[in-house]
Image (spheres, rainbow, N blue to C red):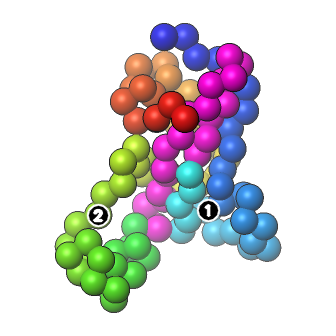
Amino acid sequence: MEYEIRQIHLSVEKLGLPDINYGEENTDVIVEMTDGNLYAASFYSYGNLDKVIARHRASGEFLDGKYFWVEGMVFVLNCEMNTIAEVVRYLIDEGDFDRIFKLL
């Protein structure tokens, strides 16, 4: 399938936080195509994973932090727009986009 990106939206940027540490964040990524279709996946920075595991150990979720998964999850170096856009384009070029992103 041919994809042409119109715009990429990051949920972390919609929160209006004054000082985002993109190296320790996660974000839902919505990719809007020129045909109007929207696709979604969750991106986690490597640095965010430690925070998520610690939170789950404290809360008891995910068997006290012994595992973690999210459908459509991608780990990235950071959650900056440039990094996310590069990864999305790469996933499209390599044919993996449909395996990760869900049509909304």
Number of the front mark, 2 or 1: 2
Identify the main secondary structure in magenta.
strand
**Which secondary structure lies at badge 1?**
helix
Residue 51 visible: yes
Horizontal side of residue 96 vs 3, given as left or right:
left
Q: Residue 70: which quarter of the image? A: bottom left
Provide residue 62's location: percent of width, then percent of height.
26, 72
Q: Which of marks 1 and 2 precedes in the sequence?
A: 1
Q: Is residue 89 above or below residue 47?
A: above
Disc 1 marks which residue? 22
Residue 5 visible: no
Q: Which residues are magenta?
A: 29-48
What amino acid does circle 1 point to?
A: Tyr
- In the current view of this chain or complex, which residue is farthest to the top? 2
Q: Is residue 101 above or below residue 50?
A: above
Q: Nearer the viewer, residue 16 or 19?
A: 16
Query: In percent of the image, x 47 and y 68: which residue is there?
Result: 48
Question: Mark 2–mark 1 contact, CB under 8 Å?
Answer: no
- In the current view of this chain or complex, which residue is farthest to the front? 104
What amino acid does circle 2 point to?
A: Phe
Quarter of the C terminus within the rendering: top right
Q: Is residue 50 above or below residue 85?
A: below
